[in-house]
Amino acid sequence: MNLERMLTMCREGQWSVDELDWSVTPRAFTREQELAICQYFTDMSGIELLAAALFEVQRDSTDDPILARIFDSFVADERRHAVVARRLAAHYDTRSLRRYQINPNLERFRGPFLDVLHRVSPEVANAYITTGELLLDVALLRSLNDYVDDDMSQQAMARINRDESRHIAVDYYMVEHYASPEHAAREAAGPRRSILARLRAALAMIVMLYRAGPFLREVFFEPLDLTDPSGRRMLEAFKRMQLLGRKPEVAARPFPTFLRTMQGLYNHPLIGRAFEPIIRRAIGLDARVIVDLYTPEELRRAQRMSIAEMAEEALQLKFAT
Ligand SMILES: [Fe+2]
Ligand SMILES: [Fe+2]
């Protein structure tokens, strides 16, 4: 990837919330639809702020000045998306049925999550942002937008999608960077972290994973069940992550290894049955996505592709139906 060119795209891609035409009248919704839509956009604003925090960590930990500026523009993008989401929630709140607040499980997740981000490597932050953005862009936002099926949401999502295309391209680029031999060599040459620091990081991780389950369920999986009942897009998003995690150079990294170990235990005939709820809680995921979602042919194909090609394919999905 040409980072200079990416930075130019980031600069030129900036836009303001007020450029959208907020004067359009929302289409008619039932009370139940209005309640769901306003709540989901409110939660979306919370997710966007988590994404901003993930990019802040990456901005502050890179020593490449161009990457730092790219990440800085992503922080601005995500904060803008949070504002747009809040404005969308207000836009569709035509009956004032109740006061909308960010899902309490998202709020409970935020603190432990930020704690982990400051204790673990930026590589883990990148694993989270890649996963989160695939899930958000390939599944949740598209399904929510289809469900709302209204001009205002359409306008906002079109703008947001343009920003997200840059984010996903860089997310994959960073996955490739962390999986490179150059990164491994630098890591080996760098200072070793103390046992205490590693213990603290592990503890922070446990607390975060414990909080992740209810948050993911209420903010990702339940809204997806309503807006994409077939689960097609969600499974598609998870399949992309699994295929990326199966690339040999990525698979060797600590975080994908952890996830694969948990998945292996979960699918183990004896251990899986006995510890199913604990393992599921530890990975914080829905049982539907803990199994392998790809066919052997899809796996072979992905192994032949470069990570940049996989990013390109994931990007195309955002615009498919
Ligand atoms: Fe975003
Ligand atoms: Fe993003």
Image (tube, rainbow, N blue to C red):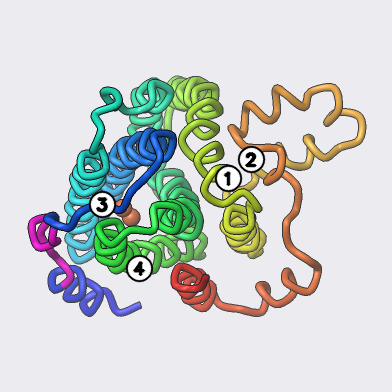
Task: Give the structural element (helix, strand or loop) at label 2.
Answer: helix
Q: Quadrant of the N terminus?
A: bottom left
Residue range (magenta): 13-21
Q: For the residue marked with disc 2, what is the amino acid?
A: Phe
Disc 1 secondary structure class: helix
Question: How far apart in space, not on screen, are marks 3 and 4 (Cα)?
Answer: 27 Å
Nearer-the-camera pick, 118 or 224: 224
The answer for how far apart the CA atoms under marks 4 and 2 are is: 28 Å
Look at discs 4 and 1 and give the one toward the viewer.
4
Relative to 19, is 302 above or below?
below
User: Height in image: 272 above or below 163?
Assistant: above
Residue on which the image places disc 4: 165
Question: Where residue 31 appears, x then y in whole percent?
Answer: 39, 34
Pointer 3 or 1: first along the chain = 3
Q: CA distance from mark 2 to mark 3?
A: 45 Å
Asked whether mark 4 and ligand 2 are closer than 8 Å, the reply comes as no
User: Could you tell me what secondary structure mostly forms the magenta stretch?
Assistant: loop
Q: Position of residue 24 (x, y in %)?
A: 17, 58
Q: Earlier in the sequence, mark 4 or mark 2?
A: 4
Which badge, 4 or 1, is on the more N-terminal residue? 4
- Could you give the CA–CA distance between mark 3 and mark 1, rounded to whole angstroms? 47 Å
Q: Please name which of the two marks, 2 or 1, marks the residue nearer to the observer.
A: 2
